[in-house]
Image (tube, rainbow, N blue to C red):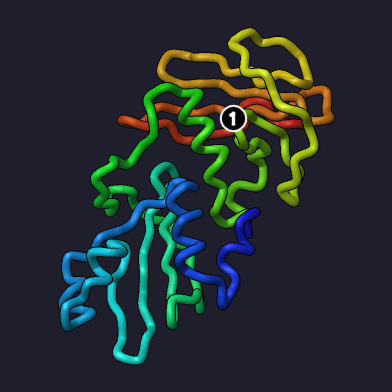
Amino acid sequence: MANHQKDLSKGKSYAEFRQSALSWGWAPVVDPNCKTNVGGTASICDERPEVESCSGDGYCILRFQHRIKDVALKVVTYADNIQSWQFTRSDRSSVTNSSGAYPSQDFTQFLAAFSRAIFVLKEQYKDFTLVYKNGDFYNIDSAGNIYSGPLAVSSNPKPDRQRLNVIKQGNDYFVKTLVNMSEGNSWLFKKTGDCWSLAEDPEAPSP
């Protein structure tokens, strides 16, 4: 599991988790049948649009869709504390949110959002070693710990360990940084529709 595993631990306050999840790029998935599923006045459907249903004994099912990645999240709560959760692959078209499904069309802002929203299955994104925090990009290790100073974003392909190269290639972007190895880490983001997606490591290091 990724770095924010602790925020999904059993018994964790759902209100605290929800505030963090929205800042990481998760969007509520609205179920039009929520009020029918909950029953009564069902005010919780207006307060928390991600609610799918709640039982009479206090259990609720809530669903999110990530704004950038094709990942959905199901959370089960009891008395407003997290009981269980599940990640699945999904289609972003399920998001019904007035703020829109994608961040700015400026690629650097997109990369910042992508790097910040790493709340997904770790094994699916284990080779992405960037994180965006407090206005800067950093390198992280396999455990999610920051081990480099802030990286200067540049469009010039220079072999500098404190530099994050972001090179435009048509509608796509090539991103590269050195991470304690001569060849460095690199990623290719391809434009699909209104958003970019991580396609491959075009300069994968030798085994």
* Residue nearer the viewer, 172 or 12: 12
- Disc 1 residue type (three-letter): Gly
User: Residue under circle 1?
Assistant: 135
Q: Secondary structure at mark 1?
A: loop
Q: Position of residue 49 (x, y in %)?
A: 28, 62
Q: Position of residue 201 (x, y in %)?
A: 62, 32
Reply above or below: 106 against 48.
above
Furthest-bottom residue in view?
57
* Residue nearer the viewer, 52 or 174: 52
Q: Quadrant of the C terminus?
A: top right
Q: Residue at x 55, y 53 (%)?
A: 119
Reply above or below: 77 against 111.
below
Q: Quadrant of the N terminus?
A: bottom right
For disc 1, the neighbor class at 10 Å (few under 14, some 14 to 19, many from 20) is few
Q: Residue at x 50, y 23 (%)?
A: 108
Q: Position of residue 137 (x, y in %)?
A: 64, 30
